[in-house]
Image (cartoon, rainbow, N blue to C red):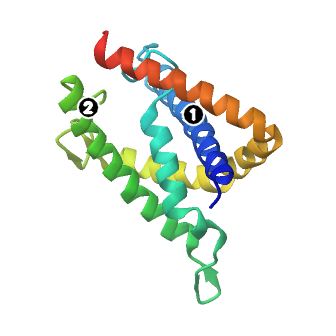
Amino acid sequence: MTTSSLIDKCSHAMLYFFAYAVIGWLYEVFLEVVVYRWGFSNRGFLFGPYLPVYGFGALLLLAAFGPLRRRRILLGPVSITPLLLFFGIMLLTTALELFTSYWMEWTAGGWQWDYSTYFCNFEGRIALNPSVRFGLGGLVFLYLLQPVLEKGVLRLGVQKSRLLALFLFVLVLADFLRAMFFQ
């Protein structure tokens, strides 16, 4: 792999990371304001309207399941690829959420959600209901959002995508450092 193609892959990864971190923030705010009617609060521990766990989760899903979304795994005449992806996404995102809760507790003294009242939960950190939602959301992500985002990133062109990725990286890094050391 050439240096240029590595830079482009990293730029695309940063753009995907940021897009899904923003989408994740919007999803959580929507749940908070519209579904649960709790009112608005800035989700997460960063200042900006993004949740890095969704960005990392998206990159993890792309690495783990991106190639699988294009394959057809058949059980008789029926493709079971979406079903396998659903369960794989559910497992991987639930593990990420559990890891994130421990990491946030270790670095910030606590985590930002509490599933202790949900059916089938573990220490309020993970639960069946959010895991199913993440599985469904992951299918929407892989089959609907990611193809559109890939086309949009390619349409930006090499130079613009590199500059935008660098800007977003610096922005998120500065916000993270602010949250860790100056809050």
Q: Is residue 105 above or below residue 84?
A: above
Q: Nearer the viewer, residue 50 or 122?
A: 50
Q: Is residue 62 above or below residue 78?
A: above
Residue furthest top as drawn: 183
Q: Is residue 37 visible?
A: no
Q: Nearer the viewer, residue 99 or 165?
A: 165
Please give left or right for residue 133 compared with residue 178 in the image.
Answer: right
Q: Is residue 88 visible?
A: yes
Please give left or right for residue 14 compared with residue 51 in the image.
Answer: right
Residue under label 2: 104
Q: Are marks 2 and 1 in contact (CB under 8 Å)?
A: no
| Local secondary structure at mark 2 | helix
Residue 111 placement: quadrant: top left
Residue furthest front as drawn: 3
Q: Residue at x 52, y 68 (%)?
A: 83
Please give left or right for residue 73 compared with residue 155 in the image.
Answer: left
Instruction: Please provide percent x and percent y for residue 131.
Output: 38, 50
Quick one: quadrant of the N terminus?
A: bottom right
Q: Residue at x 41, y 56 (%)?
A: 90
Instruction: Please provide percent x and percent y for residue 30.
Output: 53, 26
Instruction: Please provide percent x and percent y for residue 39.
Output: 44, 13
Real-space Cα separation, disc 2 to disc 1, in angstroms: 20 Å
Q: Residue at x 50, y 39 (%)?
A: 55
Between discs 2 and 1, the one toward the N terminus: 1
What amino acid type should be assigned to the residue bearing mark 1? Phe
Residue under label 1: 18
| Local secondary structure at mark 1 | helix
Q: Residues within 10 Å of mark 2 (few under 14, many from 20)?
A: some
